[in-house]
Image (spheres, helix red, strand yellow):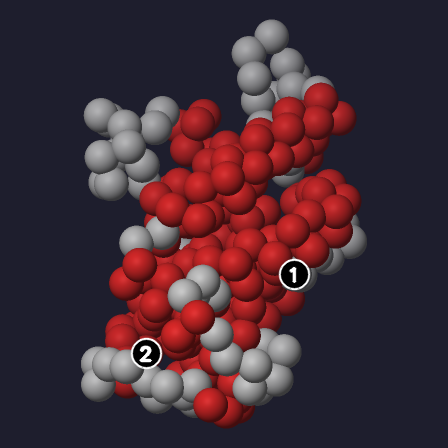
Amino acid sequence: RGLSFELDPSLLTVADDLEQNVKDMTFFAGCFFDKLKQKGGDLPRNLSCLLHQLRLLSEARFPNSGHKVVAGLFVQRFVISAVESPHTYGLTDAPPDASLQRALKLLCSTLLALSLDEEFDRGAPLASMNPFIKSNARSMKDLLMSVSTMTDDSWEYSDPKKVVVYSRDVPDLLRLIVNKMEIIERHAYLQEQQHEELRGSFLRLRAAVADLT
């Protein structure tokens, strides 16, 4: 049997086994997330600097929200974009075929929910991924905090109100982030009815980032 990651009962074929598909998608998502955690420390210094400043600016205004704002840039803008269109970023020579593209779309939906720490509504096609989201929520938050923390002593701040903005370009960068989040908002998986709650969380996150500009 060829691998099928389809989780929507209405889209299953006679050859599909939903229970096995859930296991396969959970394994697929787990392998990807493990690799993401392994490579999280390899970000370019400039990107880490931006994420660091963005998180501290956010926490100064909205305590305990910094990691979600980081998710809005790091996961949704960089990770998901690359997963959805690997050929665009030179990761593959050609676009994925329809079957793999569907699997990547489901993976992106799962990663988006995980980064926002939002489970799917009960009865939604991807609700079967909620155990994965719940079991990895802490690890995702740790990853977001890690990629947005500079290790140099000069970058360590115990009080987010003491954040030092080292670049005059930060407001422009924040506006760019908001613009990119508006593009992400139009992605198909956020437009689907079963993702309405997730879409609401994303819109609130976008509004929080916009308020920082």
Per the image, label 2 sits on a secondary structure element best described as: helix
**Crowd band around label 1 with a 10 angstrom C-alpha radius: few (<14), some (14–19), many (20+):** some
- Distance, label 2 to label 1, CA atoms, is 22 Å
Please say if 162 is above or below 193.
Answer: below
Left or right: 103, with 91 as reference point: right
The C terminus - image quarter: bottom left
Which residue is at the front of the view, 155 or 55?
155
Which residue is at the front of the view, 191 or 153?
153
Which residue appears at 64% of the width and 14% of the height?
A: 15
For the question of whether residue 204 can be seen, the reply is no
Which residue appears at 61% of the width and 35% of the height?
A: 30
Left or right: 19, with 24 as reference point: right
Which residue appears at 21% of the width and 85% of the height?
A: 168
Q: Which labelled disc corresponds to residue 139?
A: none
Please say if 104 is above or below 71.
Answer: above
Of mark 2 and mark 1, the one earlier in the sequence is 1
Q: Picture quarter containing residue 187?
A: bottom left
**Crowd band around label 2 with a 10 angstrom C-alpha radius: few (<14), some (14–19), many (20+):** some
Please say if 169 is above or below 16.
Answer: below
Per the image, label 1 sits on a secondary structure element best described as: loop
Q: How many marks?
A: 2
Q: Which labelled disc corresponds to residue 174?
A: 2
Residue 78 is situated, as x and y percent measured from the top left of the image, at: 36, 53
Residue 161 is situated, as x and y percent measured from the top left of the image, at: 50, 91
The residue where tag 1 is placed is 117
Residue 171 is situated, as x and y percent measured from the top left of the image, at: 28, 85
Which residue is at the front of the view, 99 or 59?
59
Which residue appears at 30% of the width and 54% of the height?
A: 44
Amino acid identity at mark 1? Asp
Left or right: 84, with 10 as reference point: left
Amino acid identity at mark 2? Leu
